[in-house]
Image (spheres, rainbow, N blue to C red):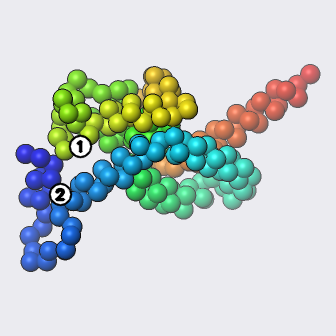
Amino acid sequence: MTQATVVRKTAPKSDYKPSDVSPQRRVQRSYTVRLWSVRHSRLLEWFYGRFADAFLMLHPLWKGLGYERVEAPVKFVEKRVKGFMFDCRMCGQCILSSTGMSCPMNCPKQLRNGPCGGVRANGNCEVEPDMPCVWVKAWEGSRNMVHGDAILNVQKPVDQSLRETSAWLRVTAQSAAAREAAVQSEAKP
Ligand code: SF4
């Protein structure tokens, strides 16, 4: 049974049939954006670099307002933008730049260090046969990226306590702390 069939069977029954939106189309559309992001991983890598720099420049603002106070609005935006682009699951510890812009949390087994042994011959997932394996796509996306070899880095297990938190703010705060530590060590005689 395909994922589209499961979606169709579990959809609530009613006479209302929206035109042009079948469960199959809906499933394909979500993959369409996700796959577009992988195909354009180099462009997104460049954009994310500039975006991270801009966020870091705003560190004094985040700090002045209080990171904990800006968490909710930033998370609101991050969830929607990354949800649309990558089907983000808000794990809070984003590794898109190391996975060819293919979110590993879409793997039904949530593997963060490569695919399982069940990838189908057509490159699709063994659990969700309609879905391209996120790790097959991750490898393809990484080959387009300047720092694509980061896919070879071993990733730490997911810290579940960080779920539903903003990875953007966390990375910014960590980068700011590293930058301040570097400045202080240079200032020491
Ligand atoms: S790795 Fe985590 S934060 Fe990044 S897109 Fe996937 S679920 Fe979202």
Q: Residues within 10 Å of mark 2 (few under 14, many from 20)?
A: some
Front position in the image: 127 or 175: 127
106 is higher (above) or lower (below) than 16: above
Q: Determine the image quadrant of residue 61.
A: bottom right
* Structural distance between the alpha carbons of marks 1 and 2: 12 Å
Amino acid type at circle 1 is Met
The image quarter in which residue 124 lies: top left
**In the rendering, which numbered label is found on residue 131?**
1
Local crowd size for mark 1, using a 10 Å CA cut-off: few (<14), some (14–19), many (≥20): some
Q: Earlier in the sequence, mark 1 or mark 2?
A: 2
Across and down, in percent, residue 17 comes to 14, 74
* Residue at image coords 29%, 57%: 29
Measured as percent of width and height from the top left, residue 133 is found at 27, 36
Q: Could you say whether the residue bearing mark 1 is in a helix, strand or loop?
A: loop
* Horizontal relation, residue 7 to residue 107: left or right: left
- Residue 73 seen in the figure: yes
- Per the image, the residue denoted by label 2 is 24
Left or right, residue 117 beside residue 78:
left
Residue 121 on image: x %, y %? 18, 29
Residue at x 76%, y 32% (from the top left corner): 181
Instruction: Determine the secondary structure under disc 2.
Output: helix
Image quarter of the C terminus:
top right
* Left or right: where 118 falls relative to 93: left
Quadrant for residue 14, please give it. bottom left
Residue placed at 23% from the left, 43% from the top?
131
